[in-house]
Image (cartoon, rainbow, N blue to C red):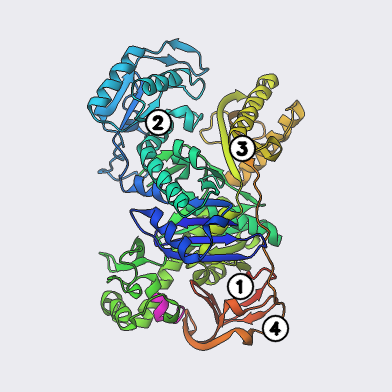
Amino acid sequence: MRVATDIGGTFTDLVYVDQNGKMGVAKSHTTPPHFEQGVMDVINVSGIDPELLQTFIHGTTVIINALTERKGVKTGLITTKGFRDVLEIARGNRPDLFNVRYEKPTAFVPRYLRQEVEERLNYKGEVIQALNKQQVKDIIHYFQKEEVEAIAVSYIHAYSNPTHEQETVELIKGLWPEVAVTASHEVTKEWREYERTSTVVLNSYVKPIAASYVDRLENELKQIGSESQKYIMQSNGGTTTFEQSKQTPINMLESGPVAGIYGAAILGKMLGEHNIIAFDIGGTTAKCSLIDNGEVKVSTDYSIERTDKTAGYPVKVPVVDIVEIGNGGGSIAWIDGGGSLRVGPKSAGALPGPVAYGKGGQDPTTTDANLVVGRLSAKNFDNDVDMDKVRLSIKEKIAAPFNTSVEEAALGIIRIANSNMLNALKLISVRKGYDPREFVLVAFGGGGSMHAPALAQDLGVKKGIVPVAASVFSAFGMLMTDLRHDYIQTFIRRVDGLDLLELNEKLIIQEKDALVQYNNEGIESENVVLTRFADLRYVGQEHTVKVPIPSGEITEETVQQVIQKFHETHEQLYTFKLEEASTEIVNLHLTAFGIVHKPELAKLDKVGGTAEEALKEVRPVLYEGKGWTDANVYDRNLLSADVVIQGPAVIEEQSNSTILYPGQTLTVDSYGNLIIDTGV
């Protein structure tokens, strides 16, 4: 049995697939701060036998929570003399340009814990000044006195030659083996001293937290009799071992959300759809990503807490290109100082949750609004819903100030939430030069299928897909992932006069490193798939464009093919190309997949039949522009393959509702996925 668990802001999800391809799902409430208890709870709820667990894959929010809530450990930084304040200086490109009160983000390491060492390399990695080891020893003693719990080491140009960082780490481990330590070259070999230093500091800041959590989870699994292979989801869309995750926990930053994006790509391949907009609505956030020709886009230009007002903190590790906004089922509706209705980003979360959960929530949420307009049924909640309380909350907080009915106020909440989500979908499609009409929308998460049919119409998307187990689809995505490691090396060279021998040597070294690492993790070389990329730019530019490099030896002919692909991609992203301009390589990027056995999904036993066999009731539902309309309500679990349903309709399951609008048509495919013709 292959099992995946995913910790969300409100629920912890589980999906399993047995040896016959049969899928099962379970949900339980997330249990902060002891998140591992939620994992044990959902395993217990699922009823699976832990001893049958062959593979266990886990996605967690522990790392992002520790960073955003500032619950990491006291961290010290050792850096090159003259670079003590790089975290403070940061970048000059202020996001909020005309705000005279703008403040840069506060560094995670205060100045008194940022210490300098005499050492220096040039950009080629050649030693200019040897490492002053005595200064390193003095700093270690100082950090011990200050009761530092983790140390980050970041030297200038260490991406080119990590010798001095390696010597420093060796000294620290020799004098103080208990302290957590990370050197920058261990997390990234990409240039940009500020971004690289920020990344290694954040990794050290959460390293003891990650190690403690992973160890507790592993012990809990052993106690229930599970001796399975254990993996953790990474931000790059692949998995890694429990042991490796404790060394570079920063790679788990977006552990949960990216799994659903990867799952959407896998589902697309199964269904013959290669252009996909993946759309995930959970309890706290809505997330979306664009998959172009089957490729999940991964970038190292990622920051946490970055908004249009704040610069955030850069993280120079591979992360799936994802747009995330604070709109989900638990997002609170409120009225701002200007008298406008707003939804999110603040969320009711798991506790107290929406008013409908009956756990003390007082503020109306998107979930409460969907209940009032008939899109959700109180019968599907795992608690008794007090509809009077739900309606009273919307009446007092929203309807009364606008002098409107509770129903119109609830519909207004949904429309505002949809508008916020539509903007996010445009950011990853229209704003990046893609035509949404050429894509299908795969909607998942607890609220994805409820909002997606309306959003698809507004966006011009012709087809929507609601997968099987949509509410736990991120966990499904984990089941279908391979191990993944990324090796990125800054290699700045003009393409004119490029030394092909040097280039090929660098590529071979990357591939050897990948094979050695997988061999240490028990993956045979024949099960390792290597994919090469290069980050290119026109000489004089700041930004780069990632393009694939063919496998095998690089020749003049393949260089020209890569350059041509660069021009085409640059034109798509930035609307122009400069074919006469000189180009240069900035980074070499190797992605290495360790292929693991994945389950074959079973098809539905029953084919044909009629929708009437699954009809539960006829219920009035409030639609935008249509008013109250009688909609047929169907039990998704009773729908057989090839059944066709005409909107307006609601397709219900325990943790999901799919809202079909008038004029839309839904077909159940052979796997049980819901295929929606949006009527565009």
- Residue 574 vertical position relative to residue 599 in the rendered view, above or below: above
Q: Position of residue 164 (x, y in %)?
A: 44, 18
In the picture, the disc for residue 522 is 3
Instruction: Say which residue label 4 marks.
Output: 609
**Observer-nearest of 242 and 528:** 242
Kindly report the distance in space between the C-alpha atoms of the residues bearing marks 2 and 4: 61 Å
Question: What range is drawn magenta here?
Answer: 369-376
Q: Residue, x 47% and y 22% (percent of image)? A: 158
Q: Secondary structure at mark 4?
A: loop
Instruction: Tell which tag, 1 or 3, sits nearer the viewer.
Output: 3
Q: Which circle's residue, 2 or 3, is located before the other in the chain? A: 2
Q: Which disc, if any, is residue 197?
A: 2
Q: Nearer the viewer, residue 662 or 138?
A: 138
416 or 512: nearer the eye?
A: 512
Residue drawn at 57 percent across, 33 percent down:
487
Q: Are marks 2 and 3 in contact (CB under 8 Å)?
A: no
Precedes in sequence: disc 1 or disc 3: 3
In the image, what residue occupies the spot 72% across and 35% down? 550
